[in-house]
Amino acid sequence: MERIFYVTTPIYYPNAVPHIGTAYTTIAADVLTRFRRICGEEAYFLTGTDEHAQKVQEAAKGEGVSAREYVDRIVLAFKEVWRGLSIEYDDFIRTTENRHIKVAQSVFQTLLERGKIYKGYYEGWYCVPCESFWLESQLTATPDGKKLCPNGECGRPVGWVKDEEYFFKLSEYQEPLLAYYKAHQDFVRPRSRFNEVVSFVERGLQDICVSRKGMKWGIQVPGDPEFVIYVWIDALTNYITAAGYLSDEKRMRSLWPASLHLVGKDILRFHAVIWPAMLMALGLDLPEKVFANGWLVIGGEKISKSRGVKRNLVELIEEYGSDPLRYFLLREGSFGQDFEFSEEALIRRLNTDLADDLGNLVHRTLSMLERYRNGKVEKPSSLFQDADEGVIGEVNALPGSLRREMDELAFHEALQEIWKVVVSLNRYVEITQPWNLNKEKKEERLSQVMYVLCEGLAALAVLLYPFIPVSAQNIWEQLGLQGQVREQRLDRIQWGAHAEFQCKKGTPLFPKKEAASLEG
Ligand code: MSP
């Protein structure tokens, strides 16, 4: 059975519509999936919503609707925003779906039967927004004695909970986890996060509470209707539900273990400690890699529902377009690190990289070709000149270097590599001066130059497709090439592959934005 590149995003709490911060990981997953496909691999992309959170129930109450009604509405908003950002997931899982409830309950039951989950007493602090239990020693205290959630991005008051609850024997997994990390040094990325996880586990693990008593909104503990399954345990199992666990063995064999869980750095422990321990307890393989991405911040603070950008995500998409947003998010920061979001920076990238460099290259090439040759250039029979070799070599080397950068999820470096070629091709226009070749009637050389430029653009369209799919298809069509850019393959990017180009110039790809638009 052929293994499939299976990539997941976190499943998002549908307590509000998605914001640019939540879009970040989802865009990255989409880019990776598209990239694997043009590498000729099969890929599968899962995203979804984590619906049984208490804060979802509270948001519904705030609006005076049932939790079910509320999540149904927000899920539609999620799907619409993802469509607006050209996110093409293969599956959108909702934890309220029957297929998932069955799996979550069965996982709980199996762990109970194996003695990995037991009933005991829980007394302690709980943070509703984070859906997390905390030790007294972990809490932050205010001068007036209020106890606050220690999660850096939260800091909200915690509440005391005291009940009979179910526990997962996480403490049994310290040694197995450490052994696993040792044998799989790539399990968590970036490396600094891997080290953090290892030292966290080295400090010792305690059993964790995996139920909530007396709650209605959640998946019932099998055979004990007084309890629902703790939302994080419910949520983590989504990755195997969608892979066909207990429902489709064949699918499970091809999808599991997941190739990559993309997660924000704040939820890394759930994915790199608790989830692997659960999988070990279930006798399932562990995911190949967990990558913790940084946050989008403003003034150093994480963007969230409550601390946000001036414009919401829908407005940002309308104002700048999906491709520029995708490009900006993956080009501006390094994926493992936090980075500052600002519309000024976005406009700068749009006006320089996209409009001045790429857009201009496409536009000037096709304008010259239309003016000099009615848009048509055939593959020249004579040899290229020295000036051409440099740029041809750069284009040919690009798929290989891109593959390496993308395997490391170094999106910004992959884009930098591509842009070096964009810049080189613009320089090539300056050096070869096609307008003079035309004036001086150097027909053969003009053909060579125009063909080099068109071949360069065709390669760029394929290489850019994962990042800016709409514009890449547009370039492909302007070059008059058949089929869809998404059907192309990286290893078929070959100099001289096209017998001719019959181009039809379109409108400029990336109209520039005035910084003044920020005042609107
Ligand atoms: N429901 C859980 C995840 C369960 S996965 C089995 C959850 N949901 S969340 O909606 O609160 O957050 C989902 C993801 O969005 C997290 O990975 C979080 O890091 C990410 N982000 C939220 N705000 C973000 C930024 N400002 N920047 C980058 N990522 C952001 O946690």
Image (cartoon, grey):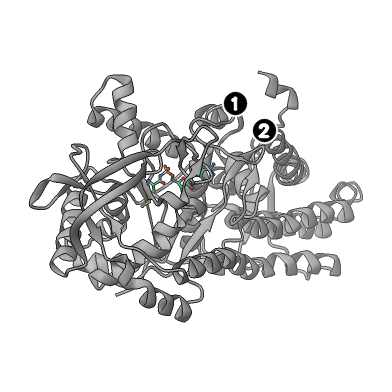
Q: How far apart are marks 1 and 2 (CA)?
A: 9 Å
Q: Is residue 455 visible?
A: no
Mark 1 within 8 Å of ligand 1, using the beta carbon: no
Residue situated in front as seen by the camera: 146 or 67: 146
Residue 232 percent across, percent down from the top left: 32, 51
Residue 253 left/right relative to 149: left
411 to 202, vertically: above or below: above
The structure residue drawn at horizontal position 51% and vertical position 36%, both measured from the top left corner, is 304
The structure residue drawn at horizontal position 35% and vertical position 67%, both measured from the top left corner, is 276
Residue situated in front as seen by the camera: 274 or 404: 274
Q: Which mark is residue 265?
A: none
Residue with the mark numbered 2: 343
Label 2 environment density (alpha carbons within 10 Å; few <14, some 14–19, many ≥20): some
- In this rendering, the label closer to the viewer, 1 or 2: 1
What kind of element bears circle 2? Answer: helix
Asked if the residue under mark 2 is in contact with the one under mark 1, i.e. CB atoms within 8 Å, the reply is yes
Residue with the mark numbered 1: 310
Residue 131 left/right relative to 107: right
Q: Which quadrant of the figure contains the C terminus?
A: top right
Mark 2 within 8 Å of ligand 1, using the beta carbon: no
66 to 329, vertically: above or below: above
What kind of element bears circle 1? Answer: loop
Name of the residue lying farthest toward the front = 144
Please name the amino acid that badge 1 sits on: Lys
The structure residue drawn at horizontal position 32% and vertical position 34%, both measured from the top left corner, is 56
